[in-house]
Image (cartoon, grey):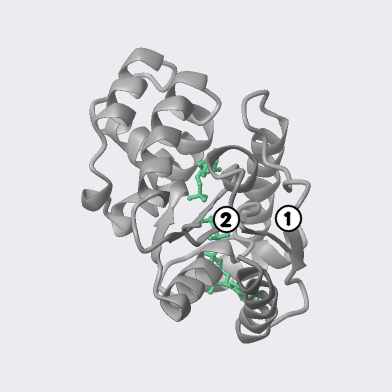
Amino acid sequence: MMPVIAIDGPAASGKGTLARRIAAHYGLRHLDTGLTYRAVAHALLAADAPLDDEARAIEAAETLDLAAMNRTILADHGVGEAASRIAVMPGVRRALVARQRAFAATPPGAVLDGRDIGTVVCPDAPVKLYVTAGAPERARRRYHEILAGGGEADETAILADIERRDARDMGRSDSPLRPANDAHLLDTSDMTIEAAFQAARAIIDRALDRI
Ligand SMILES: Nc1ncnc2c1ncn2[C@@H]1O[C@H](COP(=O)(O)OP(=O)(O)OP(=O)(O)O)[C@@H](O)[C@H]1O
Ligand SMILES: Nc1ccn([C@@H]2O[C@H](COP(=O)(O)O)[C@@H](O)[C@H]2O)c(=O)n1
């Protein structure tokens, strides 16, 4: 079986940080699926198209070049907010999930992180992690990340944004954010990045031993 590691969790929980380290450690490819939703949203914003233009969003999803996604441009706060709005559209999800599954099926195996990897994109993944942390801790981390990058931020506004994003991602009818029944829960609220990686590694080593 192709080693596929599925990592889900809410905004700023640390799933991307963990996914990158896990991919490097196990020699697997990595896809941040949040970037795929951001890229579709960015295509609409760049064309001055309304975010509820589903036909246009689907076309952007079907023609998306995964290799050309620019993390720096897509990291913009407004793009993230727009991404969570176009992510409720079933046609967009169908198109992006097809691309994500193709990525996961390419040797030597992959780590995918997002909101629906363990439940929808790769339900047969041999290892699933659901990474979480309390909303205030996630807001604190994002706040310090922005300051470290030389930007300015308001921690209270970040917390409100995270809570709004959580509600939209968990409340949508198509592929809501939730842990898969067989996911390992990893609450990193009181863990350093290193401690979270070591906890994930122990889970993955046990699971990969069995396949
Ligand atoms: N265990 C941890 N302890 C402290 N800081 C952490 C921890 N894990 C991640 N971080 C930091 O928190 C911030 C958010 O992490 P990251 O970008 O990995 O989250 P994410 O879940 O991928 O976010 P998003 O869903 O918005 O893409 C980063 O600055 C990262 O360095
Ligand atoms: N598998 C996924 C990944 C992401 N989304 C939506 O995209 C938004 C942006 O994601 P980030 O991880 O980059 O913050 C996110 O809020 C989700 O609405 C998704 O639906 N499914």
* SS state under label 2: strand
Residue drawn at (73%, 48%) of the image? 179
Identified by mark 1, the residue type is Ala
Task: Give how far across and how far down residue 73 sits, in percent.
Answer: 29, 53
Residue indicated by mark 2: 6
Task: Give how far across and how far down residue 65 sits, in percent.
Answer: 23, 42
Horizontally, residue 195 falls left or right of residue 21, namely right
Horizontally, residue 54 falls left or right of residue 210, namely left
Task: Give how far across and how far down residue 72 sits, in percent.
Answer: 31, 59
Specify the quadrant of the image occupied by residue 171: top right
Q: Is residue 46 above or below residue 141?
A: above
Residue indicated by mark 1: 183
Q: Are marks 1 and 2 in contact (CB under 8 Å)?
A: yes
- Along the line of sight, the residue nearer the viewer: 189 or 51: 189
Answer with mark 1 or mark 2, whichever residue precedes in sequence: 2
Classify mark 1: residues with Cα within 10 Å, few (<14), some (14-19) or many (20+). many
Asked whether residue 127 is in view, the answer is yes
Specify the quadrant of the image occupied by residue 98: top left
Q: Is residue 139 above or below residue 176?
A: below
- Along the line of sight, the residue nearer the viewer: 46 or 168: 168
* SS state under label 1: loop
Horizontally, residue 206 falls left or right of residue 89, namely right
